[in-house]
Image (cartoon, rainbow, N blue to C red):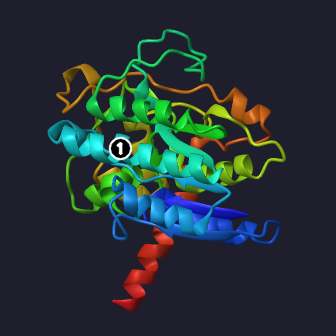
Amino acid sequence: MRLYITGADGSLGKALAQELGVDARTVDWTVQGVSVHDFDIADEAAVAASIDSFRPDIVLHLAAISIVAPCETDPALALRVNVSGVHQVAEACRRNGSRMVYMSSDYVFDGVKASADGYRENDVPNPLSVYALTKLAGEQIAAHVPEHLVIRTSWLFGGAAENNDDVLATIRAAERGEQQELIDDQYSRPTYTVDLARAIIHLITQDEFPTGIVHAANEGRATRYELGAYALMQYDPKLSADHPPTAISFDDCEFVGGRPKVSAFNTDRLAQLGFAMPVWRDAVDRHCTVLAGRAASERTTA
């Protein structure tokens, strides 16, 4: 199977690279990954040349500006990367007969759904920010590819940088002795990049390629406070006791760009397609083990 991945140097892209290596025992993969360092994702000629020369069976489009604030402060750039970039990739998929997998977000919803069941794939989006608008636009563009799959996910953690890993950011801030304020009444489903990568591989290797939209997130909902406090305790109980986070309210915060207050997914379709996501606490346990091992290795080599 020939798989082309944009945004391959991001946290999810790196998790996919790791998991694809494991999966190579059962699937014959030929993978090409590209990043922002290779070319401008909105450059029609560059995208066409790269994808056309590889002729992939599947294009997994991860490249995006995935943080809300930069999209609000530079909407033109957000549109270029998150909308025009998707268009160029989708056109290349159509031209090559490739399947397209597009990553989207819980932020396409406004967070006002009252049901404890969570947002389903057919619920009507209502974006509250430039970022969310661009992700929804990307979904609509991807839908023009005959065989397309939109995977919405939420609250990703598992990277190597604080700006895209809430768990790591909470731990590092505590290590610096910072007093952290974490929201305790905004709910979603934290998602570990490793588990999401495994879900993606499961979906794209089905005998019958699943099309449309699938929600993929770790099991169970949480607040930012619950996620951070649990991660600190699992990583280092003493650090947690010395520098515990303070719980604050969503309504007392000022954000750059709107955010949904409750955006937890329903993931029944993912389960029906044969993949069960682990509970988020289990995912945090595994990530903290990785972080602790990394820290020990750094101390040894310092």
Q: Amino acid at mark 1?
A: Ser
Is 119 located above or below residue 71 in the figure? Answer: above
Is 5 located above or below residue 101 in the figure? Answer: below
Most foreground residue, 125 or 168: 125
Q: Quadrant of the C terminus?
A: bottom left
Residue hosting label 1: 84
Residue extending furthest toward the bottom: 301
Residue 103, horizontal then vertical, whole percent: 51, 43
| Left or right placement of residue 190 versus residue 81 in this view | right
Residue 298, horizontal then vertical, whole percent: 39, 82
| Left or right placement of residue 127 versus residue 91 in this view | left
Is 111 located above or below residue 68 in the figure? Answer: above
Residue 170 visible in the snapshot: no
Residue 48, horizontal then vertical, whole percent: 46, 59
| Left or right placement of residue 243 versus residue 95 in this view | left
Residue 246 visible in the snapshot: yes
Number of other residues with Cα within 10 Å of mark 1, as a class: few under 14, some 14 to 19, many 20 or more: many
Q: Give residue 300's quadrant in the image.
A: bottom left
Residue at 55% across, 63% down: 52
Residue at 49% across, 9% down: 114
Q: Secondary structure at mark 1?
A: helix
Residue 244, horizontal then vertical, whole percent: 31, 46
| Left or right placement of residue 5 versus residue 31 in this view | left
How many numbered discs, if any? 1
Q: Quadrant of the N terminus?
A: bottom right
Most foreground residue, 223 or 151: 151
Most foreground residue, 251 or 4: 4
Residue at 20% across, 47% down: 179
Q: Give residue 295's quadrant in the image.
A: bottom left
Most foreground residue, 89 or 195: 89
